[in-house]
Image (cartoon, rainbow, N blue to C red):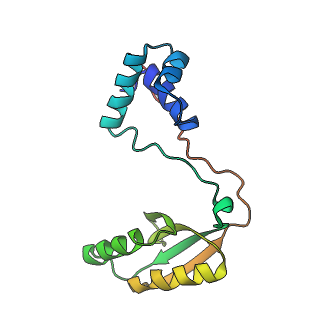
Amino acid sequence: MISKYDRAILELLQQDATLSVGEIAERVALSKSACWRRIQKLEQDGVLRERVAIINQDKVNLPLTVYISIRTNQHNDNWSANFKRLVETIPEVMEVYRMSGELDYLMKAVVTDMPGYDRLYKEIIKADLFDVSSSFVMETMKQTTRLPLHHLQSE
């Protein structure tokens, strides 16, 4: 169970992972050592997967986000494992999900431009796909990495 302290720590770390343990401890009203133990436990339990810096993709010349819908006619473990290995080698691919419904996979990628997308497309189709359809982001209306935690029950 996630305590009210753990929830508060998680909220703070989602806002700014560079906060020191002392700053977090002060904000959640814990001692530094108690706060540090809680953070370590959250990491050990896999609640905190990683602490990262989020880069502005426009500032590193990756202004084009594309969502790629993929259908395959090969629904077997071997094909799936090969597809997973392929997409893991492509740095432009940010996220890949196996989906329910008419769509088999949904992929999010970032590229420099249309020729960059074309290079990505040529890599992806090496997976022997049945159908590929892409949609390009024209405007980002909301983007966050922060998970909502208000639903968690506190001790």
> From the image, which quarter does the N terminus lie in?
top left
The quarter of the image holding the C terminus is: top left
Residue placed at 37% from the left, 17% from the top? 33
Q: Residue at x 46, y 82 (%)?
A: 123
Residue at left offset 34%, top offset 30%: 40
Q: Pick whichever, 83 or 17, lies toward us.
A: 17
Instruction: Write down the quadrant of residue 109 in the picture.
Output: bottom right
- Measured from the top left, where is residue 104 in percent x and y? 44, 72
Quadrant of residue 130 within the rendered picture: bottom left
Whether residue 79 sits left or right of residue 100 in the image: it is left
Q: How many marks?
A: 0
Q: Is residue 150 visible?
A: no
Name above or below for residue 52 compared with residue 57: above
Position of 53 with respect to 137 (left or right) is: left
Q: Is residue 127 visible?
A: yes
Place residue 98 in its image quadrant.
Answer: bottom left
Query: Is residue 15 left or right of 47 when viewed as pictured?
Result: right
Q: Position of residue 103 (x, y in %)?
A: 48, 72
Q: Nearer the viewer, residue 71 or 144?
A: 144
> Left or right of 79: which side holds 65?
right
Please name the residue shown 41% across and 21% down the image: 35
Q: Residue furthest left?
A: 78
Asked if residue 118 is positioned above or below residue 25 in the image, the reply reads below
Residue 32 horizontal/vertical position (percent): 42, 17
Q: How far across and how far down the image is residue 56, in percent?
A: 64, 55
Of residue 15 and residue 127, the one placed in the foreground of this image is 15
